[in-house]
Image: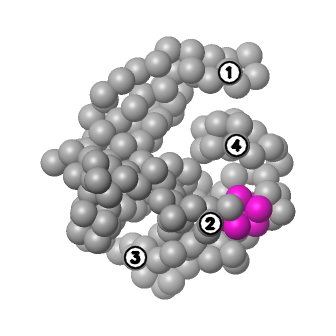
Amino acid sequence: MKNTLRLRPYKKEDGTYLLNWLTDRRMLGMWCRDHFSFPLSAEQLEQYYKELEKDSRSFAFTALNEKGIPVGSFRMSRVDYEKKSVHLGFIVIDQSLRGQGLGGQMVTLAVGYAKEFLGMERITLNVFDCNPGAKRCYEKVGFYEEQFKKEDFAFEEEKWGIYLMVYDK
């Protein structure tokens, strides 16, 4: 599949897209656990990204389609230059565009950036067991399960397990 996505640093106006993509309480929980409260607001995002900018070990990205329109977002955090490791998180694709391979393209670009520009050898991410589509997406990119924690997070009446997945090729 041809890569049609590009990455660029997150910009404040990208929050408008996140607000449109994360309109469901369950989806918000899968995206951020309980880091944000529902409904997601521009104020919450602004405060979060202000804090992120102060963290020299974290970066936020937006994925753009061929027309330059945001279609996805993620962050890299816990950058450790000595251990050559980084963690991907807050991964989301516009829900109206899911199932088209864009998530895999975006994560592939993220892995490429981490390896080529940051010199990382170990890239990790977490995914809840209630999100098998995302887990399959990450596996297609080359991530594998390293650890599983059963009932790691309580969402309403559910208990979600979480996989720690690793890319280290």
* Spatial CA span between label 2 and label 4: 17 Å
Q: Which residue is mark 4?
A: 35
- Find out whether the residues at labels 3 and 4 contact each other: C-beta distance under 8 Å: no
Q: Earlier in the sequence, mark 1 or mark 2?
A: 2
For badge 3, the amino acid type reads Arg
Which colouring convention does the figure follow?
one colour
For the residue labelled by badge 2, is the local secondary structure a helix, a strand or a loop?
Answer: helix
Q: Earlier in the sequence, mark 2 or mark 3?
A: 3
In percent of width and height, residue 138 lies at 34, 44
Residue sitting at x 74%, y 46%? 36
Report which quarter residue 120 is drawn in: bottom left
Which residues make up the magenta segment? 45-50
Furthest toward the left, the residue is: 169
* Spatial CA span between label 1 and label 3: 35 Å
In percent of width and height, residue 81 lies at 32, 57
Q: Earlier in the sequence, mark 3 or mark 4?
A: 3
Q: Residues within 10 Å of mark 4 (few under 14, many from 20)?
A: few
For the residue labelled by badge 3, is the local secondary structure a helix, a strand or a loop?
Answer: strand
Q: Which residue is mark 3?
A: 6
Q: Which residue is mark 2?
A: 54
In percent of width and height, residue 14 lies at 65, 73
- Find out whether the residues at labels 1 and 3 contact each other: C-beta distance under 8 Å: no
Q: Nearer the viewer, residue 107 or 12?
A: 12
Q: For the residues carrying marks 2 and 4, which lies nearer the camera in this image?
A: 2
* Spatial CA span between label 4 and label 1: 13 Å
Q: Which mark is residue 154?
A: 1
